[in-house]
Image (cartoon, helix red, strand yellow):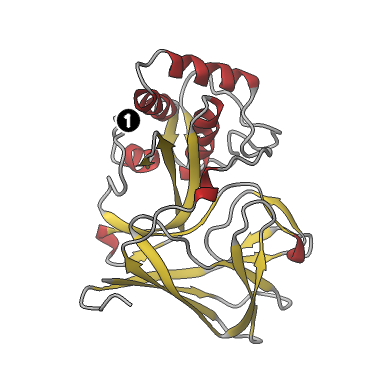
Amino acid sequence: MNTHVSVTVAPHEGASRKLLVPVGLPTPHQMPVHFAVAGGNYTLTGETTTGQIVAVVVPEPGQQVEVRYRYREGGPGYPDSIFTPHRNRFTRAAEALVFDAINIAETQTDGHAAIQALVNSCAEKFRYGHADVRFNDGCDEVPYLSCGLTEGSCVDINTYLIASLRAAGFDAGYLTGYFFPQEKNGCCDDAHCWVVTRHNGVVLEWDIAHHLKMGTREVCCGLNPKPGDRVALAHSMGLSFPALGIECEKLVSEPGWVSDDGRLQPARLTISRVIDKDAEAA
């Protein structure tokens, strides 16, 4: 079975710009086997801390860009590099958060129970939403949330969860990709993210945001608690691409325009996927 994903990028309104585009990431479930761009030319460049490769697309004047991916069912697992912590303002836990995470973990009987307890604690601190100001905006570290509910998206929730897990000494990785809800028949509006933990050789996946959207804070491990399917694009936070003048960008997910000051800016996208169940594994 192959999953075909198409991302169409509307022309930039103004001067010609470059697009930064992730090329896809292997998981235990899928392997990216094809990447192509129509409506522009692309080169590849690397990220300094994780070694990830991304495409840099220069669109043809006035043309939309279409990025095409193909993923084959079954994969080698998540890259080991997703579990390597890189300390920056998006991943560094505040002292109070470190203290809280260690206390939560130490009350549990084993590592897997501690991971579940940290996931549960994170879920209890958020209500799903897209706040105008994120809980860690303007901070040099991930702050501790002491009481009440904080409005946050999947990005915000998983930022807090990753900081908590690593503060307690657990291997954890932050993944970005596309999630296609079952009810949208192969379409989605933007990127999504989730967390992967690794303890004693066991890899587990967590999607708190989808549990909250379904009205529950009883979070179970595993992908797609909300029916649908997903593909992985990139990983980690605080990414730098020297060739583009980008320094410590929070994350890479869907295609974004590279600004003159080395930041990623949103693009107008149309995202769709088709699953070819009869395709032979290539």
Residue plotted at (64% across, 41% down): 86
Query: In the orientation shown, which residue stands out farthest toward the front?
Result: 201
Residue plotted at (58% across, 57% down): 252
Residue 124, image x and y in percent?
40, 25
* 48 in relation to 225, above or below: below
Residue plotted at (67% across, 51% down): 49
* 227 in relation to 99, above or below: below
Left/right placement of residue 249 relative to residue 32 reads: right
Residue plotted at (51% across, 24% down): 168
Q: Quadrant of the C terminus?
A: bottom left
* 12 in relation to 90, above or below: below
- Location of mark 1 (residue): 217
Dot 1, crowdedness within 10 Å: few (<14), some or many (≥20)? many
Query: Residue 110 appears in which quarter of the rendering?
Result: top left
Residue 159, image x and y in percent?
54, 38
Total count of labels: 1
Q: Nearer the viewer, residue 171 or 152?
A: 171
Query: Residue 230 appears in which quarter of the rendering?
Result: bottom left
Left/right placement of residue 146 relative to residue 121 reads: right
Helix, strand or loop for disc 1:
loop
Question: Is residue 119 visible to the viewer in this orientation of the structure?
Answer: yes
Query: In the orientation shown, which residue stands out farthest toward the left?
Result: 278
Q: Nearer the viewer, residue 109 or 138?
A: 109
